[in-house]
Amino acid sequence: MANQPVTTRIVLASRPVGKPVTANFRLERETLRDLDEGEVLLQILYLSLDPYMRGRMDDAKSYAAPVEIGGVMEGGTVARVAKSRNTAFTPGDIVLSHSGWQSHAISDGAGLRKLDPDAAPISTALGILGMPGFTAYAGLRNIARPKAGETLVVAAASGAVGSAVGQIGKIFGARVVGIAGGPDKCRYIHDELGFDAAIDHRADDFQTQLASACPNGIDIYFENVGGHVWSAVFPLLNDFARVPICGLIAHYNEDQSTSRRSDQLPAVMRAILRKSLTIRGFIQREFADQRPDFYREAGKWISEGRLRYKEDIVDGLENAPDAFLGLLEGQNFGKLIVRVAQS
Amino acid sequence: MANQPVTTRIVLASRPVGKPVTANFRLERETLRDLDEGEVLLQILYLSLDPYMRGRMDDAKSYAAPVEIGGVMEGGTVARVAKSRNTAFTPGDIVLSHSGWQSHAISDGAGLRKLDPDAAPISTALGILGMPGFTAYAGLRNIARPKAGETLVVAAASGAVGSAVGQIGKIFGARVVGIAGGPDKCRYIHDELGFDAAIDHRADDFQTQLASACPNGIDIYFENVGGHVWSAVFPLLNDFARVPICGLIAHYNEDQSTSRRSDQLPAVMRAILRKSLTIRGFIQREFADQRPDFYREAGKWISEGRLRYKEDIVDGLENAPDAFLGLLEGQNFGKLIVRVAQS
């Protein structure tokens, strides 16, 4: 039993009330058992940190079960097969897995997808060529359906989903206005990603700037934020505008019982009727059958330089909680990934 | 110039604040001019009264221009051609027109649709075979898209749109739960129209009754009401539920500045995301190219006894304002139509 691998893992210590804090997480170590027939031992190389994980910390009904107290925090990972008793996998294989916030994991092979390290950097399977990139692609192709020249607005525009929405939106023919926090992110999406306009939502005259950047109104608002960005976008929506909703990060930490705003819902419902709006929530896996199209097309766009990406890499699993708390505050710049081990 | 026809018309005297009152309308008489070449004189037989007309009384941005102060109230009508200087029309022809709340009108023929009095009672062109029936058909076919066995809920279920939604929904394979005001309307939709269940929204335990009638949740809520019915339906919506919105009668008389409810919007947005809901406002004319399909299919369903209708006929144009005010309170029973002249 010497050399038995020890996994380091971060578990949910307690459920947050409102904004999560470091004390909601706990680092643990555990010696792993031997592999059974058909299983592989994975060494995690990269862990993706994404806003949806905030939802998993709550004990509320959602499209996915919450993480249990004491359970390993959920998350997408890129791993190397360290040992294999599964004929489909060979030690050294690089795979996409959903192993969560830990250094090692045992898998029966189900749900693993082999990655080709020569085709693209393996970390991109968590970002531009992974769930966030596919969220952008699926929402645009199935719900937003941009027509040439339409105005598309996306918030968190330097982030993993937003940056892909803007660039793929342009490939699909839209005029793209990005909303981001601070001048550096705005400069990046405009100068490096080629967005037609970039607006800083922290500016005092944010709403006025947004209206100026959308002289023909807004045909598509790709919603991944909510909050005051929604309030600024909403009056600018055109007839027949489409609003795919893939995230609401501004609301994830809200204590639902304390809203003091008067009810905005009737005005929103009236506008949905008056303007024939489409508001549509979605999770990318609804469109899973389009993933092969996405891998093919996005790979091509990346190789042509039409689809660019930025990764914000944090070293060390022990730093995942702080990095995640920063993500919820918009402190990351690009797709946030934890390097759990050197590849 | 003897025998020159005089039109009696009801104009918008003033804009309502909140709930409209009789004083917002005024009856006028005017002698009509001679016909020009290409024109016809219409004698209005039936005037349709519909909830959307409340919106035309406001000076607010909408999908249609408001009625001007002093202008004739807008509305769909069935008319007889009394005189014609248009080669396409012969005196005696029965046409669908949009002549508004008046007894006579001059038309250049644009937008008139000839009706066949032998095919169906001509008043049905304002109801089951007209805009309300087509609203139901278009919303079901394009947005709700019921799958066999899905649960469809519709409010104002004995009304012009709701009764068609329920019956066509059943033809499309859904299990249909109707919400109506009072035992008579509930009995009618259940016993005569064949709805699977009927719930009285005035009952104290309305929400409990609705939940009991929808043991598998709600897959489609055809929204034409809003208000407390929406609040009861909303928690019961299933993943991937669709909510076509064609009306919000509960909100039409709301003074938008006085809502004291706390903000319901964040909870609704979160549910749209969590449950992958589709909320979609629409006006039937968006789907105008499907009208021929509708006339053919609905005509067949009526002749087979699968699509039934009830008309609530009020005699005399002078009674239109009171009838309309009653409509906004749910006092009609069936499609509300004013008989302006004997056919």
Image (cartoon, coloured by chain):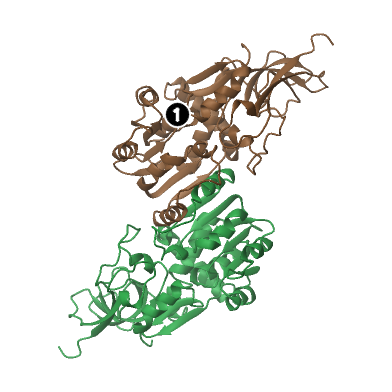
Chain colours: A brown, B green
Task: Please tell me which residue lies in front, A332 or A104.
Answer: A332
In the figure, is residue B46 to the left or right of B330? left
State which quadrant residue B3 falls in.
Answer: bottom left
Residue depicted at x 44% and y 22%: A308
* Residue A44 horizontal/vertical position (percent): 66, 18
Q: Chain of mark 1?
A: A
Using the image, determine if residue B264 lies above or below residue A165. below
**Which residue is situated farthest in the right direction here?**
A1
Q: Circle 1 is placed at which residue position?
A: A163
Q: A135 or A181, which is in the foreground?
A: A181
> Residue at horizontal 49%, vertical 34%?
A136
On-image quarter of the C terminus of chain B: bottom left
B116 w.r.t. A52: above or below: below
Q: At numbered mark 1, what does the secondary structure look like: helix, strand or loop?
A: helix
At label 1, which amino acid type do we have? Ser
Image vertical order of residue B123 relative to residue A316, above or below: below
Pick the quarter of the image with the N terminus of chain B. Answer: bottom left
Spot occupied by residue A223 in the image (x, y as percentages of width and height): 47, 40
Q: Is residue A222 visible?
A: no
10 Å crowding of disc 1: few (<14), some (14-19), many (20+): many
When asked about the image quadrant of residue A202, the answer is: top left
In screen coordinates, is B59 left or right of B149?
Answer: left
Q: Position of residue A188 (x, y in %)?
A: 38, 23
Q: Is residue A115 visible?
A: yes
Find residue B290 and report its horizontal and vertical position in percent.
45, 60
